[in-house]
Every structure is written in C-alpha cells, then in structure tokens.
Amino acid sequence: MFYLRKLPEAKTLPEIRKTDGTVVPERPYMSDDRAVYKHRDFSRFYRGGFTGLDGRYQGMKVYTCKTLKRILELRESTLRATGELFEVYDENGKVEFPIAETSVPQ
C-alpha cells in the first residue's frame, strides 16, 4: 500500500518590508509532518498533519492505494493544485524511483 507524506523541513523565511516602513526580520520556520487524507463519505482529498497510518485526522484516514501509478497521479495533481510536493511511502519507508517517472510543472 502506497501513501503520500511530506516530512517536516526547516526553512528560513526572508525579511518582509511593510508599507509603513517596518521590517519583519529573516526568521527560521519549521514545517509540519503532513499527509494526504480522504474522508470515506466525500470524494475529495485533504492535506493535514500526519498522525500515523492507523491514526485519524479530523475523522479522516490517510489515503492509501495499491498501485504506484494511481499514487503518482494523485501526487502530480496535488503538486499542480497546491504547489506542495509529497513523497511516496509504503510500509517499508520512502519509495525511490527514477526522476523520469515524475513530472514537475514548469
């Protein structure tokens, strides 16, 4: 079973110059551990904090599927819609595959 997950990552947010002349300085930011969820009663997908494969996020379960082709299609559509690139995982951890199989929007 394959699922989409994005591990937390540390970023540095650039400084922001406001119109009133004040400056918000450059600062560190840590993203959340996220996954793609699907509610059993609805046909759309949601992104939220990863609680484990058996855990629930607001009544939803992590979306898993048996075929790599389907999970790659969902990964690509999520990337197009939100700009967020999720990694593909299975029961053994992160799935590595050649770059040629994935597509990144231009």
Image (cartoon, helix red, strand yellow):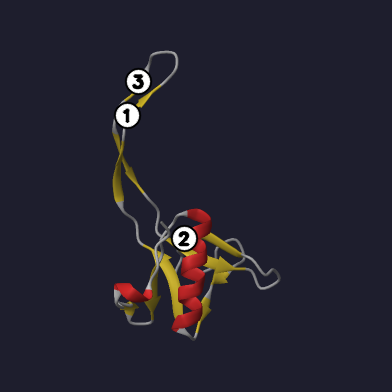
Report the side of 100 relative to 36 (left or right).
left
Q: Amino acid at mark 2?
A: Leu
Q: Tell which of 23 and 41 is nearer to you.
A: 23
Residue 1 visible: no
Q: Which class describes the residues within 10 Å of circle 1: few (<14), some (14-19), or many (20+)?
A: few
Quarter of the image with the N terminus in it: bottom left
- Residue that mark 3 sits on: 23
Name the image quarter holding residue 12: top left
On the question of residue 31 being in view, the answer is yes
Q: Report the residue marked by disc 1.
A: 15
Hey, what amino acid is under mark 1? Glu
Q: Which residue is depicted at the point 31% across and 53% down?
A: 9
Image disc number at residue 79:
2
Q: Which class describes the residues within 10 Å of circle 2: few (<14), some (14-19), or many (20+)?
A: some
SS label for mark 1: loop
In the rendered view of the protein, which quadrant contains the C terminus?
bottom left
Q: Position of residue 17 (x, y in %)?
A: 37, 22
Q: Quadrant of residue 58?
A: bottom right
